[in-house]
Amino acid sequence: MLLTVGYAALLFLRRPAGWSDPTIWAEDGRLFLAGTFNPAADVFTIYAGQLWPFQRLVAAGIAQLPTVWWPLALYAVSCAVAAVMISVVLSERARPLLGAFWWRALAAAALVLLPGTWEVQGNLANLHWWATIAAMVLLAMTPARSAVWRWVEIAFLLLVALTGLGGLLLVPIALWRVLTGVRTRAVAIRSVLIFAAAAVNLAIAARYSTRAGASDPLGAWPTMVEFVEVRVGQVLLVGERGLATLNLPAVALTVAAVVLLVLVALLVLTDMRGPSWAWLATGLAAIVLAMASLPEVERPLVLQPYISGRYAVLAMAAVVLIVVRALATGTVFRRVVALVALLMMVPGFAVDAYLNPLGPGVPAAELEAFAACVAEQEQPAGEPFCYVDIQPDTGEWRIVVWRSGVDREAILEQG
């Protein structure tokens, strides 16, 4: 418990602007908080061809707080939830996977300080990536002895699998768990639910996704390979900040990234009976699904620092788990390879320990005006909506809700 609190504090401190000048990020406001004002919305409302129950449940609690508290609450709660997710590796049931407690504590600390997390740290919109990391470890562990706790874990895994494309991403680990020969009832239930959730992910994406321009997913393979080399390999070496600010020799950086990725591949190939390949497959699946769904014109953009780093988070987390597993439980050869990989990654963790602001904070006066607008009971004149601008500052990100006194049906009938 104390370590979890410490991890939450470390996450909280990584981005000083998150608590000194907090903001509201993207879908946190426009989708999740705004959705709490919509009587027609629920935790299973579809957005971008996917379900988002994990974030909607958290947002439902935050929405009960005074509006001026929202920015700080979003940041603090997101850090706390991420710390709880990461702390799954501290479980004694993770010992066969990640070794003695201090190795597991090291793995958790590395996940807390993971490079390249400018976009995913401290907001609800990307909280599912941290939950998926927890599920990656939880699925690889043997089920809990307590029947109550087993069902709690099953419910959590189902929630994560139904959020975004979580079910699809977790299929490799569920498959590995089945193939290892551990065929208890709990393992069977967990695996079946993951496979079923993956089918739901696919069905909803096929039915509701409206993204255009991604008709040639095979054409995305060059971008996928380059994305792994740049956004996973190079970021682990020098951090996202390093890519953006340090004038490093491109060829040398590419060679070093390839060497690091080859070392990770060696660790996977020498652990084929373990979960390393399944962890890596989950991380790579996130990249493949993202790149295949992107319009062709957008694919080169994801190679730039601070853009679409969310797609690389699972792969980088998988590298951390693979390296720590080799150090803690591997042969001498595997430990030497893992130690070299770890030393190569130290600069990346150090450079990215500090995270830049997501953007300017939302002024308290604007939030107060928004709250007063929402609470208005009389039929308002003019604009039927209440809104407040949030980040990113592109003109399209804002929280928009109906005023209380508005006749919604009449306005909708008028177009």
Image (cartoon, rainbow, N blue to C red):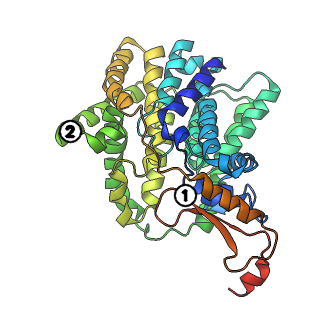
Residue 211: give x, y in percent of width and height.
51, 68
Label 2 SS: loop
Distance in Å between CA atoms under marks 1 and 2? 34 Å
Which of the pair 91/406 is nearer the observer? 406
**Residue 272 visible within the image:** no
The label shown at residue 268 is none
In which image quadrant can residue 156 be found? top right
Q: Mark 2 or mark 1, which is nearer the start of the sequence?
A: 2
**Disc 2 packing (10 Å; few <14; some 14–19; many ≥20):** few
- Three-letter amino acid code at the position of disc 2: Leu
Residue at figure coordinates x 57%, y 27% from the top left? 9
**Residue 308 visible within the image:** yes
| Horizontal side of residue 95 vs 287, given as left or right | right
| Horizontal side of residue 206 vs 360, given as left or right | right
Which of the pair 393/283 is nearer the observer? 393
Which of the pair 45/141 is nearer the observer? 45
Which of the pair 1/233 is nearer the observer? 1
| Horizontal side of residue 146 vs 200, given as left or right | right
In which image quadrant can residue 397 be found? bottom right
The label shown at residue 248 is 2
- Three-letter amino acid code at the position of disc 1: Ile
Name the mark nearer the viewer: 1 or 2.
1
Residue most toward the front?
365
Residue 79: give x, y in percent of width and height.
59, 36
Name the residue carrying label 1: 390
| Horizontal side of residue 109 vs 65, given as left or right | left
